[in-house]
Amino acid sequence: MTLSAADGNAILNENFAPWVRELGLVVEETGELMAVLRLPWSTRLARQGGAMCGQALMAAADTATVIAVSSARGEFVPMTTVQQSSTFQRPVVDVDVLVTATLTKLGRTLAFAEVAMTAGGNVAAHATTVYALL
């Protein structure tokens, strides 16, 4: 049983650190092996030069993976990041980012995901994540 977007937003509000919640992430869609979150544009997330900082994008990718794993398992379960690798392909300025986490493998103890971050219809960043399920 997958979770609804409302369930995903409840997981976000109940299980994440205040600074992660302050990013303003919203779960827009969940599925059997995926989740889509929106990272709203904010000047608070911009670095010198006006582009969204990579730290915000990486935190969004990490968070989207948790929601995707929770959706696949039908509930939030304790987990922790084992590895995350990110590439940044173009700057994000004055536009929201859609963060799509797709699980490529969900095992008993590990989960693997690909995360695409798009802005204005273009890939702005990409991440791979590995999580230990506790």
Image (cartoon, helix red, strand yellow):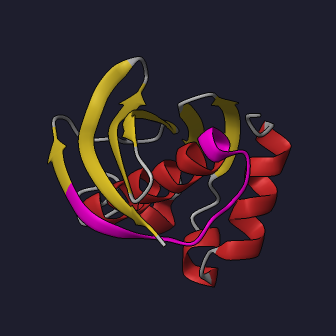
Quadrant in the picture for residue 82: bottom left
Q: Is residue 91 visible?
A: yes
Quadrant in the picture for residue 18: bottom right
- 43 relative to 91, above or below: below
The x, y position of residue 70, in whole percent, is 63, 51
The x, y position of residue 68, in whole percent, is 55, 43
- 76 relative to 34, above or below: below
- Magenta residues span 71-84
Q: Is residue 76 magenta?
A: yes
Left or right: residue 111 versus residue 69 is: left
- 42 relative to 90, above or below: below
Q: Residue furthest top?
A: 121
Tell which of 125 and 75 is nearer to you: 75
What residue is rendered at 45% in x and 55% in y?
A: 60
Q: Is residue 51 magenta?
A: no
Left or right: residue 126 versus residue 93 is: left
The x, y position of residue 122, in whole percent, is 33, 20
